[in-house]
Image (cartoon, grey):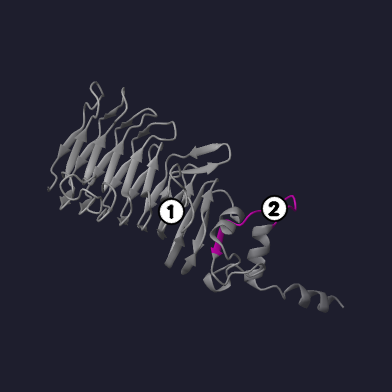
């Protein structure tokens, strides 16, 4: 009888043992997994060790289930949803993962500091109405109690397109990075603003392509004022042919390669670096500095070594 017990005890495969260990804490309670997979064919109870065995069919379900600081691997396919990240999470697209946010206020909201999103396509956000962000990726989540912005975000190697607002909206965030992204054919390519009641500062916008954004600029640094846009770095980006779909294009179009602007008295857009970028064929200038009203603080901005 002892041999039967021993043989039964080794029937667990190594994968099952690992999964069981991950789910059980020292106190016997279930613990959230540190890595999950999302697939169009995902289903509850799957092993969740690869795209072929994904346990989740929506990105939001994966985000809700993963442990704080964990990774959500999003497998190839199109996901019609709006995703809210409220705990530190890394979202990683694998081989053509698309969020189609048609009819949604935004595609992906990062409302937890130190979160990241890599290699995702986010498109067609258009359902936020006049007051909604309509952004592909935004540095906040919007709740019934108001927006919750986050800092130290990393947004890399994504494609954002067809979003009515900004492709990427670094709104009221600090120490965040947007790099290596393709932000084409949105209202604005990459927006840096303070609409959510906090300054946008110390952010890095580097090596992105922000082309053919129909309603506005490739990159916008705009104080509205929450209070200010300062000490950001906009470097080594390509920003061409923006703002050419507005009614007055091209001579009086809204589209600049990069714009630094504040229409609000007391506005601050200062200490920003615009360097090493390429601007071609935009409706307005390659770089525009627009104070709108007298007395705004535009001191300390450096615009150097750009190709216009």
Q: Position of residue 243 (x, y in %)?
A: 24, 50
Q: Quadrant of residue 45?
A: bottom right
Q: Residues within 10 Å of mark 1 (few under 14, many from 20)?
A: many
Q: Residues within 10 Å of mark 2 (few under 14, many from 20)?
A: few
User: Magenta segment: does it hold 27?
Assistant: yes
Label 2: which secondary element? loop
Q: Quadrant of residue 177?
A: top left
Residue at 33% in and 36% down: 202
Q: Measured along the vertical axis of the image, is residue 86 above or below residue 157?
A: above
Q: Quadrant of residue 222?
A: top left
Residue 126: assigned label: 1
What residue would you read off at disc 2?
Answer: 25
Label 1: which secondary element? loop
| Residue lying at the far front of the rendered structure | 247
- Main SS of residues in magenta: loop
The answer to whether 291 appears left or right of 62 in the picture is left
Asked whether 256 or 232 is in front, the reply is 256
Q: Write the start and end of the magenta stretch as one range.
A: 24-37
Give the label, 2 or 1, closer to the camera.
1
Residue at 44% in and 35% down: 196
Asked whether 252 or 59 is in front, the reply is 252
């Amino acid at each position: 009888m002892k041999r039967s017990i021993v043989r039964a005890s080794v029937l667990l495969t190594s994968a099952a043992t690992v999964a069981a260990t991950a789910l059980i804490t020292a106190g016997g309670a279930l613990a959230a997994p540190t890595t999950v997979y999302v697939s169009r064919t995902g289903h509850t109870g799957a092993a969740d060790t690869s795209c072929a065995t994904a346990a989740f069919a929506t990105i939001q379900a994966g985000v809700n289930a993963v442990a704080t600081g964990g990774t959500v691997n999003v497998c190839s396919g199109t996901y019609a949803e709006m995703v809210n990240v409220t705990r530190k999470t890394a979202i990683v697209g694998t081989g053509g993962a698309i969020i189609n946010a048609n009819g949604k206020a935004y595609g992906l909201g990062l409302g937890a500091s130190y979160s990241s999103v890599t290699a995702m396509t986010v498109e067609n956000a258009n359902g936020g109405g006049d007051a909604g962000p309509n952004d592909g990726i935004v540095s906040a989540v919007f709740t019934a109690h108001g927006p919750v912005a986050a800092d130290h975000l990393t947004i890399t190697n994504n494609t954002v397109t067809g979003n009515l607002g900004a492709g990427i909206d670094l709104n009221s965030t600090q120490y965040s990075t947007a790099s290596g992204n393709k932000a084409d054919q949105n209202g604005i390519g990459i927006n840096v603003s303070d609409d959510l009641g906090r300054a946008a500062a110390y952010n890095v916008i580097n090596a992105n392509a922000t082309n053919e954004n129909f309603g506005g600029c490739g990159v916008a640094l705009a104080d509205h004022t929450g209070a200010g846009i300062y000490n950001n770095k906009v470097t080594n980006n390509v920003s061409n042919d923006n703002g050419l779909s507005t009614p007055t294009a091209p001579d009086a179009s809204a589209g600049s390669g990069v714009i630094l602007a504040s229409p609000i008295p007391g506005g601050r857009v200062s200490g920003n670096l615009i360097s090493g970028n390429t601007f071609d064929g935009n409706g307005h200038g390659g770089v525009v500095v627009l104070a709108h009203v007298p007395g705004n603080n535009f001191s300390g901005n450096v615009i150097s070594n750009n190709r216009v």
